[in-house]
């Protein structure tokens, strides 16, 4: 079954248990392609999503469970979306054996107060291909426009999701990112940060682990930086990744403090939503780029070696970024 050009979502499952979405195609829907909300357990599999104004696949508002029923997202293809996967306040989700490429961001579990059951916690991202997520959908002639009005304001500028990133853990607690191939993302391969403007303490990124990922395709298709961590929370750690270029350009906390091995020592991290000051400043400057298309000014662009017959997104026909 195929759902195309709907003003909201392609496929929407709400308040259910043990659903399955299989062999679906979602294309150019205004918000989400495959959308599950307030559900216990389930599966999305063998499906394709492209052209969504938010994400191709979405799992949101998972209730807390003493004996969790896990949700599997597997054998999926998400490309040319604002986000490949998004999940606000989701839990017990395993995203595996899938491909997320040519999106603004590949995979984004997150915590927001717009939906119930904060925070986002306990998930796995493993055995995926996450590459070339360099889709600057903010350009004037982009075929996809974001449905989001942004995530608020900072110093009078709207806050937008970063582009040019493979994986973002935004306010997540206890996610594991392991055994993925992450390459060719022009800003960050993978990033972890909290909402430093949140006063509830729930949008806190902590206890996340990045382990045994193959970054940068053996140096032939690098991310600008393999990893970014804002230094907030406690317990986030990095271990066994094949390449580890760490973004610590502002030179606040040391690289060892921001990117500790696993398990992370108690001395790492601030324990609260506001992390290392210079790291927070870099992140804030990037997500409040004005206009938002100027995020690409921070990218390090390069050609991509051929891969699986897939063409990298070409934004030269999307117009120029200007005020």
Image (tube, rainbow, N blue to C red):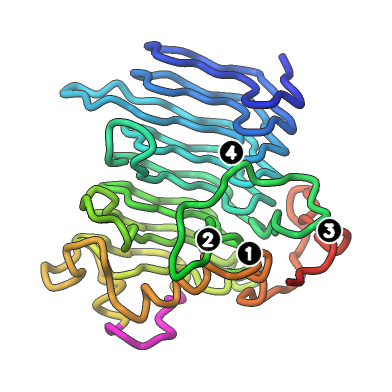
Residue 288 pos. (x, y %): 53, 67
The residue at the point 36 percent across, 57 percent down is 211
- Say which of 254 and 240 sits in front: 254
Is residue 313 found left or right of 100 in the rendered image?
right
Is residue 49 found left or right of 208 in the rendered image?
right
Q: Which of the two discs, 4 and 2, labels the residue nearer the N terminus? A: 4
**Residue 263 seen from this side:** no
- Distance Cα–Cα, label 2 vs label 3: 22 Å
Q: Which of the two discs, 3 and 4, labels the residue nearer the N terminus? A: 4
Q: Residue furthest left?
A: 266
* Image quarter hosting the N terminus: top right
The residue at the point 62 percent across, 29 percent down is 33
- Please name which of the two marks, 2 or 1, marks the residue nearer to the observer: 2
Which element carries disc 3, helix, strand or loop? loop
What residue is disc 1 on?
292
Which element carries disc 1, helix, strand or loop? helix
Q: Please, is residue 57 above or below residue 148 in the view?
A: above
- Distance Cα–Cα, label 3 vs label 1: 14 Å
Residue 38 part of the magenta segment: no
Q: Which of the two discs, 2 and 1, labels the residue nearer the N terminus? A: 2
Residue 91 pos. (x, y %): 32, 33
- Distance Cα–Cα, label 4 vs label 2: 20 Å
- Please name which of the two marks, 4 or 1, marks the residue nearer to the observer: 1
What residue is disc 3 on?
318
**Crowding near the residue tagged with mark 3, few <14, some 14–19, many ≥20 C-alpha atoms within 10 Å:** some
* Image quarter hosting the C terminus: bottom right
Q: Which residues are magenta?
A: 245-254
What residue is disc 4 on?
55
The residue at the point 52 percent across, 30 percent down is 74
What residue is disc 2 on?
158
């Amino acid at each position: 079954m195929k759902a195309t050009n709907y003003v909201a979502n392609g496929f929407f499952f709400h308040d259910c248990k043990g659903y399955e979405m299989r062999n679906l195609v979602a294309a150019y829907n205004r918000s989400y392609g495959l959308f599950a909300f307030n559900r216990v357990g389930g599966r999305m599999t063998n499906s394709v999503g492209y052209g969504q104004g938010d994400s191709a696949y979405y799992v949101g508002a998972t209730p807390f469970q003493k004996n969790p029923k896990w949700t599997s997202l597997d054998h999926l293809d998400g490309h040319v979306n604002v986000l490949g996967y998004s999940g606000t306040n989701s839990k017990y989700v395993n995203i595996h054996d899938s491909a997320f490429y040519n999106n603004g961001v590949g995979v984004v579990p997150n915590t927001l107060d717009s939906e119930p059951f904060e925070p986002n916690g306990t998930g796995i991202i493993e055995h995926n291909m996450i590459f070339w997520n360099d889709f600057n959908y903010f350009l004037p002639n982009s075929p996809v426009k974001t449905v989001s009005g942004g995530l608020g304001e900072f110093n009078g500028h709207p806050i937008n999701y970063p582009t040019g990133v493979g994986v973002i853990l935004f306010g997540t607690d206890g996610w594991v990112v392991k055994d993925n191939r992450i390459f060719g993302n022009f800003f960050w391969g993978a990033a972890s940060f909290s909402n430093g403007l949140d006063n509830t303490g729930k949008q806190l990124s902590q206890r996340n682990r990045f382990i045994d990922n193959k970054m940068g395709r053996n140096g032939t298709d690098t991310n600008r930086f393999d990893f970014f961590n804002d230094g907030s929370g406690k317990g986030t750690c990095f271990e066994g990744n094949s390449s580890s270029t760490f973004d610590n350009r502002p030179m606040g906390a040391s690289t060892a403090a921001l990117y500790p091995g696993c398990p992370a020592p108690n001395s790492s991290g601030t324990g609260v939503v506001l992390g290392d000051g210079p790291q927070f400043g870099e992140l804030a400057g990037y997500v409040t780029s004005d206009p938002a298309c100027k995020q690409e000014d921070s990218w390090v662009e390069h050609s991509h070696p051929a891969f699986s017959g897939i063409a990298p997104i070409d934004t030269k026909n999307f117009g120029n970024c200007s005020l």
